[in-house]
Image (spheres, rainbow, N blue to C red):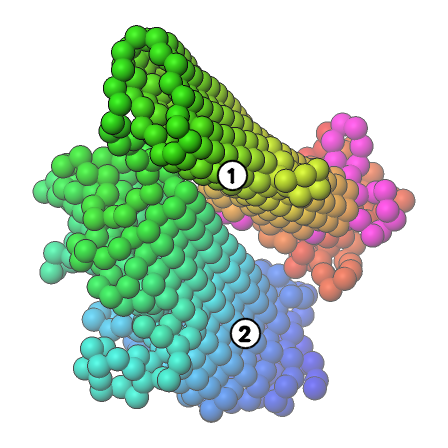
Amino acid sequence: MATITVTNIENNGDGSLREAIAKAKSGDTIKFARTLANKTITLQRAFIIDKSLTIDGANAPGLTLSGNKEKVIFKLAGKGREFTTRNLKLTDAFNDYAGGAIWAQDSKAKITVVNSEFKNNIAGQGSAIWAKDGANVTVINSNFDGNEATQRGVDSAAGAISVFNKSQLTVQDSEFTNNKGDAGGAVGTIFTEVTIENSTFFNNESRRFSGALHSDGASIPNQERYYKGSLPGDSKGGEIVIRDSHFEDNRTRGFGGGFGVWGYDQDFVTIDNNTIINNQVTKDSQGRAKGGGARVSGFVTIKDTLFANNKSDAEGGGLWYQGEVPVKITNSNFSGNRAKGATGKGLGGAIFNNQWGSETKIENTTFEDNYAGSEAGAIYTPNNRSITIQDSIFDKNKAGNSANSQQSNLEIFEDITDGSLRLKNNNLLQGSGKNDSFEQGAGNDILLGRNGRDLLKGGDGNDSLQGGGDNDTLWGGKGNDFLEGGFDDDRLDGGAGKDTLNGGYQNDTLKGGKGNDHLNGGAGDDRLKGDRGNDTLFGGNNSDRLEGGAGNDSLEGDAGNNTTWAGNDTLIGGSGNDILEGNAGSDFLNGGVGKDTLSGGKGSDRLQGSSGNDSLDGGVGNDRLWGGRDNDLLNGGEGNDTLLGQQGNDYLWGDQGSDLLKGGSGNDTLVGGKGNDQLVGEVGNDVLIGSTGRDFFKGGRGKDRFVLGDTKGIFYKADSNQDYATISDFQHSQDVIELKGKASNYHLSATSKNGISGTGIFTTKGELIAIVQNTESSELNLNADYFNYI
């Protein structure tokens, strides 16, 4: 396999790209002379790719191939053609039919695009890349901006990329901005397996459905109701995966403001760790507007995902889904979504569930500040299908009819039932050892249940209730009461007043009620809810669930059965400024609404700040931290942690271990700390600060600052050339690299280390500080404005 070098920008002739393609044999690589950097090759006709080739512009940064607004750039001819582009800019291509920049007109093409840019291409379908019939398309670290599909009423008319019919599409570390289409503003697939990872979709628009991404099945449906059973359905389904990605300000009509996924009954759809914000779906010609953030179907799993401030003019402000197979939503947040049109009507501020043959399970998920114009500020389901909700928060969701949810099965703390004995004044009652029922009136009473299943109701006054053995129910009523469950599985409700509740042994349920209460679960797997007031909740041993409720609460999970076996606790702060401490064990902490402080302690913990300016500390262990809305402080602590700032201007500190930090939207500050860290700014003007180890920086969209030293010294000089930073997406037109000292303390040189190539920043003593990836040393100048010295 040979390498051929292009030496000029002529359209044909000696040294031209056209001549190089003609001379190349299958498997060869075409490169460009360094003198072609920042120049443009303007096409007079398409390049025909009739062999397997790689075309790499790394030696000529900024090289552009232009279709001159009238030509296809690369046309792949022949079945099974393999074609790779690297480090190229493809612009201004045009094709009435399909595939302006890369058009694979035959089946089973294998297309790989790395570190390339597609801008202002126009075609009927897939103006940047178009492939079909068993194709395999991979896109890595590339940008798609201002591409447009012009055909109308065609399901494969996506703005930038169209791939369909038993094909595969993989997109990683890429950005799609300002693209327009008819079915998917940026990306569209039909009967194709899809993987989208670590990518950003911003300000894309679709005329018909699916604002940024449209996926019509990972396989061909085999059910009669789809396409009237006229297709040769697949015996098994495929997968559609959207992971670690950001969808913002995308819009469409009809279905899926952010994206639309039509998984069929045999398809598996995974939506994992995404941010879906400020997307919108308006009504189409039939009056449909479904899923402001997303519209999905299939075997759907949604986890660790934020749906915020999305809007639908009719149904499902955040999410709309349907089908006959299960849907599961875990560890997610629905905040500020709206379902309301011009008429003021709308259903399901957060979710519209249109399932007709299966169930939905929702766990550890927060619904806050969502709104529907008509019914169900949080969740609407019209088909009388079961929704099982566990360990979740519903706060300040509103609707025109004041319904937070409709036809949903919720786990709640139930009211205590009536007893059979009612007494007034100050009494001491002791049970018989069987199943007793005592109800007190006014006065300071003492009720002792002893053995048996007892029902004790204190009534007014400062009462003392002790359940004793067996499964008891204790209700303090008004006054400052003391409730102790004793042995077995007890239910304690303090009622109004400043109460103290001790669960005792086994698995107890404690509810503080009104007032500033103190709850201690004791031994066993307990469930504690502070309810209203400034409460203190202490889980005790084993695996507990703590909910602060309204007020400024303090929650502490504590340890497990002994000093070496910790409990896996769930702590939910609710509204108010709360303090949550997980201590030992693998805990889940959710601060809820308010300015909260969360400490995971030992174990692999999950901390969610939710709304408010929160402070999260993972402690010891491999933890996952989500800041949620507003301006948060996240500290990973010891261990290999994942920190996600999400919305707001956040401060993320990895501390010790090899950590992953992602800022999300907003102007964030990311500090890696010790270990080999990954810092990803995502959307906004971010500051990425290194330290020691081998770190990876990606600023994302916005004006970013990469800090490689401070007033105390130069980073990455403690371990010879084994510790350094990699800056993957430096844009000298807007980003800044910050160093200690002055320009004369450093020099630039081409370098390649551990598979990473680019411009090395070295001290004058030869110590490698950083590699600016995919950049020639001639492109950078240490005296330029994009280097800042302190």
Residue found at the very far right of the displayed protein: 765
Q: Which residues are magenta?
A: 700-727
Identify the image quadrant of residue 209: bottom left
Q: Which numbered disc covers residue 245?
A: none
Badge 2 density bin: few <14, some 14–19, many ≥20, Cα 10 Å: some
Q: Whole-Å distance between the Cαs marked 1 and 2?
A: 58 Å
Residue that carries the numbered disc 2 in the rendered image: 112
Where is residue 248 shown, x and y percent of the image? 38, 48
Foreground pick, 182 / 554: 554
Number of residue marks: 2
Left or right, 208 with reference to 741: left
Give coordinates of residue 695: x percent, y percent. 71, 48
Q: Which residue is depicted at the point 41% across and 42% down?
A: 391
Picture quarter with the N terminus: bottom right
Which residue carries the number 1 mark?
506
Q: Image height check: is 630 above or below 101?
A: above
Disc 1 or disc 2, which is closer to the eye?
1
Magenta stretch holds residue 710: yes
Q: Secondary structure at mark 1?
A: loop
Residue 551, by quadrant, is top left
Amino acid type at circle 1 is Gln
Left or right, 74 with respect to 96, comes to: right
How packed is label 1: few (under 14 Cα within 10 Å), some, or many (20 or more)? many
The tag earlier along the polypeptide, 1 or 2, is: 2
Seen in the picture, residue 58 relative to 508 is either above or below; the reply is below
Q: Amino acid at mark 2?
A: Thr
Q: Is residue 772 magenta?
A: no
Query: Which residue is at a point 38% across and 72% down the rendered structure image?
Result: 267
Vertical placement of 516 versus 739: above or below? Answer: above
